[in-house]
Amino acid sequence: MQLKFIFTFLVCLSALIGRAQSTRDVMIGGGLDVIKSGSDGLLQRAQVGLEAHYFVQRHFAVGIGTELWTRPQKNSFMMGMRWYANDHVFVRFRGLIGTNDVALGLGYAKPLSQYVRLDCMGDFYFAGAVGLRGGISYILR
């Protein structure tokens, strides 16, 4: 009887500690496009994104940020949102003001610790490009 109680307690405790995000958490992060259509190869053209997200609900976040391109050299303001199907898989929608584009993406977040996550995302840009991005995020509780 006590063993079942202890096991149940440990499972519940690990679920609380291992959660990816909670309501009112802020997540900051950055990512780099590893490959993007229209490029000559891997890392031939850099596109870097810096973002901050606020979790309105446990599975829904709104965000702002910036996108920087090296070729052609330009930058853009980003507004978007993320919806998490679970603690790892998410769908994101971003508007890029400055390049007048919209991106729809699918991603996977791998927790490295309670606060740090490794992100891998694929984006479809409505202007016609497709990109694969890797990044890292930090959750502020």
Image: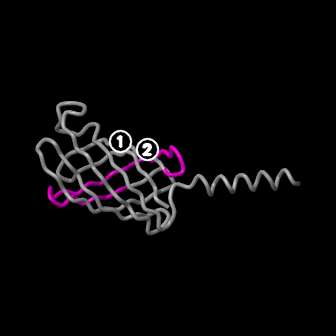
- Residue 127: x and y in percent read 17, 51
Q: Which residue is disc 1 drawn over?
A: 134
How would you rate the neighbour count of disc 1 (Cα within 10 Å): few for under 14, some for 14-19, many for 20 or more?
Answer: some
Image disc number at residue 112: none
Q: Amino acid at mark 1?
A: Gly
Q: Secondary structure at mark 2?
A: strand
In the rendered image, residue 68 lying in the magenta stretch gets the answer no
How would you rate the neighbour count of disc 2 (Cα within 10 Å): few for under 14, some for 14-19, many for 20 or more?
Answer: some
Q: Are marks 1 and 2 in contact (CB under 8 Å)?
A: yes
Residue visible at 82% across and 52% down in the picture: 4
Q: Amino acid at mark 2?
A: Leu
- Residue 115: x and y in percent read 50, 52
Stretch of the chain drawn in magenta: 92-115
Q: Which residue is disc 2 drawn over?
A: 118
Q: Secondary structure at mark 1?
A: strand
Q: Quadrant of residue 12?
A: bottom right
